Amino acid sequence: MLSPSVAASLPIAAFAAAAWMWPRVPHRAALAGAAVAFAAALVFDKTGAAVDAVWRSLWIAGPMALVIVAGVVLRDASPPTVEASAANAPGDARMRHRKLYVACFLLGPFFECAVGFGIGTMLALPFILAAGWSGARAVALGMLSQSFVPWGALAIGTMASAAIADLPPIALGIAAAESTAYLLPAFLAVFWWLTRDRKVPPAQYVEDALWLAATWGAVRIASEFLTPDIAGLAAIGAVLAVRALADGGRIDGNLWHRFWPYLVLVPLLVCVRLVAPIADLLTRIAIPTAADLSPFAPFHHAAFWLGLVAVAACVARGRNVAASVGGAIVTARGALIAGFAFILFGEMLARPGFAQILVTAAEHAAGASALLLAPILAAFGGAMTGSALAANAMALPLTLPLWGADALGGTGLQTAIAAAFTALSPSRVALAVSLVGLAGGLGLAYRALAPLAASLVLASLVAFAAERI
């Protein structure tokens, strides 16, 4: 008969073995670990807990899947791309620097918040290339658009993490914003390093820092009143509008009228959440979910309104809606499977009690130092999977017992770190490499990204130390 400690370690061993066998398909590792955990639960007569884990996983992953599919439909119907035209051509060094800042820290993050899937990088790169940058440095600049990923794809990672950890979404959004404050300087420092030019006056660097601080401040304030799925999109959209006015009302001659679906989406979502009579009406229809999860109100959920705008964009562009939805499901199937797989793996560790056994063993072996597993697992998971959702679904069941009374702050820290390290994910970097047409591929790209990796490691350690104080 297996001892509980051996049984608890088997899912981790299965995950590690499958990850070694299929390094490019991480969700297979998660499914292998979940399958072994389910079998171990049956052996130890924890069938009820295992079934509950599957049921919770379906309800956590379901809304996430709706957001993903709707986001892909919108992306395909109204692709947020620009042409490298004369309108984007660089002027003096300071103007070129300002355009690059907007692309990397405002436009890219705004569309990443709306859609996800690295769409921020896809949008930022045409501006970067048009400004005269190319090769590995252009790839590295493009990855800086992932600086606000805790709110990416309508914050599916943060929202799912709140469900996994049984935390209020607004409270977790605030905690994630506060931890992100320690990580944003790493992105900005790398931006300055990559775009260094003696012709850019020092005042411009001060301006960059002030705009980034204002953007973070807007997100932090919005997080007091809005759930994460709306807060980032609304806040960054507002700062982007102010910046556009400050820059003369336009960044590109064709930019704003191309993106009307996104401009409609932001006020629509804010209205649905902040106007009390509308919110009360939309929450009257709610579907019971797992016992310890909130009921699912489909018409109040951001996925419904994202889908509605996506359908409107399809109709306006003359696209077949059914075909677009079917194509989106095919396109997103990898993300859909991965999201569910990692949530299931985490739940299969937590519900039958395996995670608690592993945590107890880690505390016995390492004492208080065992909590260092939290930022390590977050960074590793974000970089490996390209998803804060997948990283937290895998790591939170192991680390929540270690955080104890500071579960909220710890989950916010892990969410921020996992999201930041998605900028180093092979899937996202490969996307940028293909868009740039970089000869030499991932090797050259990762050499250019080395300063970002080092900066994020240092910033994550600072954030972890601040959380522990």
Image (spheres, grey):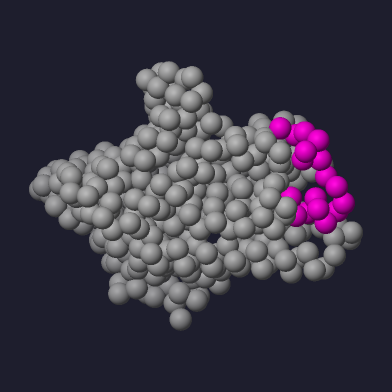
**Horizontal arrangement in the rendering, residue 273 relative to residue 110 (left or right):** left
- Which residue occupies 83% across, 45% down? 90
Q: Which residues are magenta?
A: 83-99
Is 448 placed above or below 441 here?
Answer: below
Number of marks present in the image shown? 0
Comparing 243 with 367, the one in front is 243
Q: Is residue 172 visible?
A: no
Magenta highlight on residue 91:
yes
**Horizontal arrangement in the rendering, residue 176 relative to residue 458 (left or right):** left
- Which residue occupies 30% across, 74% down? 405
- Which residue occupies 24% across, 47% down? 282
**Residue 328 location (% of width, % of height):** 43, 27
Comparing 19 with 466, the one in front is 466
Q: In the figure, residue 209 lies in which quadrant?
A: bottom right
Residue found at the very far right of the displayed protein = 199
Q: Is residue 281 visible?
A: yes
**Residue 36 location (% of width, % of height):** 26, 41
**Horizontal arrangement in the rendering, residue 344 relative to residue 330 (left or right):** left
**Residue 207 location (% of width, % of height):** 72, 66
Comparing 326 with 377, the one in front is 326
Is 174 placed above or below 447 here?
Answer: below
**Residue 249 location (% of width, % of height):** 68, 50
Magenta highlight on residue 341:
no
- Which residue occupies 61% across, 48% down? 107
Comparing 161 with 36, the one in front is 161
